[in-house]
Each structure stands twice: as C-alpha cells, then as structure tokens.
Amino acid sequence: MVTLTEQAETILETRYYLKDNTGKPQENAEQMFRRVANALAEVETKYLSLPVEVELVATDFYEMLSELYFLPNSPTLMNAGTPAGTLSGCFVLPLEDSMQDIMKTATDAAMVQKYGGGTGFALSKIRPKGDPINTTQGKACGPIEVLKTLSRVSSMITQGGKRDGANMAVMSVYHPDIRDFITCKTYEGDIHNFNISVGVDSNFMKAVINNAAYPLVHPTTDKITEWVKASEIFDIIIEGAWKNGEPGLVFIDSINKDNRVKQYHGDMIATNPCGEQPLLSNESCNLGSINLIKFFQDSDSPVWESKIDWRKLSSITELAVRFLDNVIDANTYATVDIDKMTKSTRKVGLGVMGFADLLIALKVPYNSEAALNIGRTLISFIRDIADRTSIDLGVERGPFPDWVNSDYTSNYTYRNACRLSVAPTGTISMIADTSSGIEPTFALAWRKSNILEGKSLYYVNKFFEDTAREHGFYSEDLMEHLAKGGSLQDREDVPEWAKEVYVTAPDISPAAHVNMQAAFQDAVDAGISKTINFANSATREDVQAAYLQAWETGCKGITVYRAGSRVKEVLTTGYLAETCECDIPLIVQEAGCSSCKTCGWSACEIS
C-alpha cells in the first residue's frame, strides 16, 4: 500500500492522476506508480528480455517509486503509459540567425512545452539589433525581440495542460547586445516566463579581476565591434542580480569540460530552465532524483557513515540509472531532430533530494564542514555506482551511438554520455514529503489559511516539531514567531544546538551556499540547480563576491536571490507571497519558482 501525505495526495489528484473528460481522477497513487513502472519496464523487451524478466523489472521499478526512494521528473509521472507524449523534463533548442530558423524554433518550442517540457535557448548566434539584412534591405530586430517572441509563444502554452511554460535564455558575454540582454528583465512581468543567464568564460572573469578590456564580437562575421571594460559589464550583471536575482551566470568553459562529444558537435552554450542541465542543440534529458532521507538508519555509532544504508543506496542508484535509460526509449519526442540527437548521446540526469532532511536527521548543521564532507561523500558514491551501471548497460545494450565521436579513451563503453544532474525537485520533493534538491530547509514553520473553515493553521517542519516537543521548547509563541518570518537564531528559549542543526536558508551565509554547491559539483558531470540566498540588506559587493566565488570553486553556474527584491515574492514567511488559484501563499522551491502546499500549483518548476 502506498503511503502519502495529504499534501502529496492533493498534488497528485490535481496534476498527475489520469482523468476522465469531466476532470475526475481515474487512478490513485498505486495505479499511477504501476502505470509508470510497467511502461518503463516494457522497454526491456527491446533488449531481448524474457517476459518474466520484464515482470521482475516492473516490480522493482514499482517498489522504488511507491516507496519514494526515487522519483522521475514530472513529465514521466504524468505521461508514461499514456499517448500524451514526452517523458523528458528539459530540452535545448537551436536558435540560428535566419527568419526560417527562428520560427522553426518557436514552433518546436511550442510542441515541446505542450507536453510538459522546459526549453533552453542560446541567443548568442542572433545578429545584433540594427544590423543590415541584405535580403530585405532592412535592419535586424536583434536577439531581445527574438526573446520576446519566444516568450509570447510560451505564454500560449500550458505544459501538458497542467502547468505554465518555463524557459532559459543564455547570451554570450561577447555578444554586442549584451548590455540590452542583461537589463531585459529589469521591469517585472516582461518576459516573465524566461530565466536569463549570461554565458561567461575564464578569460572574461580574469579580465574582470584584472580590470582589463575584452572584445564584443559580431556573431555572424566574427569581427570585433567594440572593446569594453569587463568590470563595466560585470557591474551591470551584478546590479541586475542584486535588484531581482537576474541574470545568473553560466560558466561555459567549466560546462564544456564534461562535454564528451565537443569535437564532433561543438560547445554546449545553453541550459535547461533551471540551469542544472547543459545540453547541445536538440538534446533532451530526463531527470530523476534519489530521496536521500530514505537511506537514514538510526544507530548509536557517532560516525555518520554508519547511519547510511549504503547497500540500499547502491541498489537504488543502479535501478534508477536503468529506469532513466529506459525513459529514452519509451519517450515520444516532439520533433525528429530531438529524437535523433537525444538517442545519439543518451544523457540521463540522476540527482538527489532530501539532503537537508538527511543532515537534520544526522544532527549536522547545513553550514558546516561536516555537511560539506557528507555531501561530497554521498554524491561521489552515487556517481561511482551510476558510472558503473552505465558501463554495464553499455556492455549489455551498447554504448551511446556518439561514443565513436567522443573523447573517451578508455575501454569502458558508457551507455550514457552524461549521468548526474542535481535538479530543484520542486513538486516531486513535495510528493515525497522531503526537502528539495540540495537546498537547505527554507522555513521551519509557515501559516496556511483554510478557506473552507475560515481558519489559519500552522504548518511545521516535521523534524523540527518532533525535536521541539521532545526537548520541551515547542510553543505557540515560537511557531507564531517563525511563521511571521522570524529567525530561530533570535530565540533565547531555543537551545544553541537546535539553532545550529535547524539553520534555514535565510540564516546561511551566501559563501556557505556556494561552498555546498561546489561540494556537489565535484562529482556531477552536468550542473546543479541551487539558489544562493541573500538577506535583503545584502550589498552589491556581497553579490559580486558570490559570483566570483562560484567561478573560483568550479561551479558551472550560479543563481542568486536577495530577499524582498521582487514585487511578487515567492517566500513563505515574512513577505507578501504570490498566490495561486487557492489564494494561499506559495512555497519557495527555487528563485523564480514556487509551489502551492494546498493544490500543488507550481510556477516554472521543471522536475
């Protein structure tokens, strides 16, 4: 029997269960997980598995899903075993400098988003605004107008009939229109369904540090159009990030260190909407996340390693990689080009969720050296098992077809060109009733209005409530303080050890946030979705320091958010929150992404 929280059941009924023509759910959680497990196990027949073997795999998949050890990205849960289309969560589409190519990309984006996928684009190849157009004797509209066109297309689409479109636009810092791109979202609401990031490299970052000039280069002629101080452009980036969290940075050269088919296909210059999955043009990636808290086992030993069920974690990692590889074959792709490119590299994105909950169970503060060590150890273990499993699948099923065009020099034939990616896990972590991605706990208590009963109720972090009651510092006054945005650190009635263990995102320094992202990045061949939180009082210099730290520590990108910096907040405590159809404050999952604890509505969450 599947055991879910009331919140998870509400989310599934609203967005995931199959429905009849009247909108009435036609399945329950058990049936949904069996639908997904059976559909993905059926792929085994393609590789000459016997019927009994397929049944065994289906059982293993079902148990892994229904016991919440692992969940795939939302499109897989929604669409597997139905004619509804894509099972992948993220895509990058090509954007070339011609009217035909731009409009084809717009059409492809609409088809991808129609069935629940998020899309990323690189504007770097589009000629600058005002550039002459020889065929019409006119002038180019420029990449920002192209971006607005793609945004309008996305506004027409409700993904899979269940959520709004989500997108990422990346522009190279060397593009002549980079200033306009950095400021294109200064006014909230304009291009609202796009996150934006600037693609930079080490040469640019070194120029910033050395106060040197660098060239802006015309994307179609390769001619230098202007020399500009790198610090001037960097200051504009920092100003935007300080004001409303955008643009982020994408470190292109760091990303392409793990691009194993670069010599054949070129650089990856764009990512999916939340930035954790850099992809080549027309590639897609199916994501899934292991729920780390499920592997906690109570032990009297003071050594944290003894409190992890490593054998179970190993077996689930193996099964999850097989599951995700099967998704590639079970998928129905929006275009022929996406089908071909995705199957050429067979990238999968296995990540984690529940990390903050695991740290709490281990009684380890998130912002500690011990937590960094735990993060590195866990993700390295998962990487080693995932790599080994992909090699085994490569022997069993054959390597990814572009293996012959890759820079792999060993005899190991990986089935998947990419194995790991840490997604934000907004909604699926709510289904699993766990913390999202590798984010710290955002709030320990929040208030939710019950419209039907006209009451206002407190919702409390399950670990914190148990601990507070057990150790005698639980009180309504404390809950009220926390629900209004107050910090646990301000309370004299709370023991110091509890303040350390139950530190929340707003209480953690930006440097500690970046260090945690970097700790996981060491073992992740794709990227990591992680928000670097700042207090409202943070300065532009604070934001700049975080951006520089992210580059210096080997991160592949960075996203920041300063509390209170947007008119429409997605915070749960202390600020006016954006609301959904329930008219209830939303729960933050990622900068610019939010979810409703009541109806499961989510804005821009992809995984």
Image (cartoon, rainbow, N blue to C red):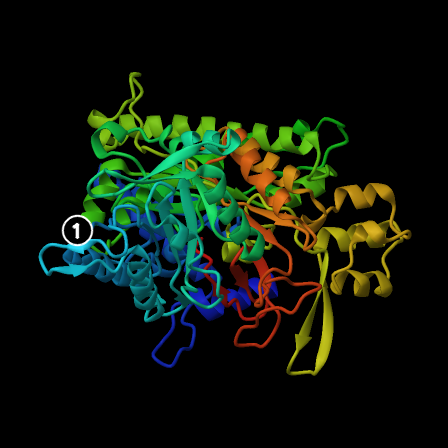
Q: What amino acid does circle 1 point to?
A: Val
Q: Position of residue 109 (x, y in %)?
A: 27, 59
71, above or below 321, in the image:
below
- Say which residue appears at 78% left-offset and 54% top-offset: 487
Residue at figure coordinates x 87%, y 50% from the top left: 494
On the rendered structure, is 189 left or right of 589? left
**Label 1: how many Cα within 10 Å (few below 14, some 14–19, many 20+):** few
**Which image quadrant is residue 193 in?**
bottom left
Which sits in the foreground, 362 or 553?
Answer: 553
Q: Quadrant of residue 224?
A: top left
* 201 sits to left or right of 508: left
Instruction: Out of 85 and 130, give the one closest to the viewer.
Output: 130
x and y percentages locating residue 46 in the rendered image: 22, 41
Residue 14: image x %, image y %?
A: 47, 70
**Residue 478, how many percent across, how many down?**
84, 60
Q: Nearer the viewer, residue 299 or 214?
A: 214
**Residue holding disc 1:** 336
Secondary element under disc 1, as helix, strand or loop, is helix
Residue 193 visible to the viewer: yes
The residue at 55%/33% (across/down) is: 518
Q: Residue furthest top?
A: 410
| 386 versus 106 height, above or below | above
Judge from the rendering whether residue 191 lies leftward or rightward of residue 143; answer left or right: right
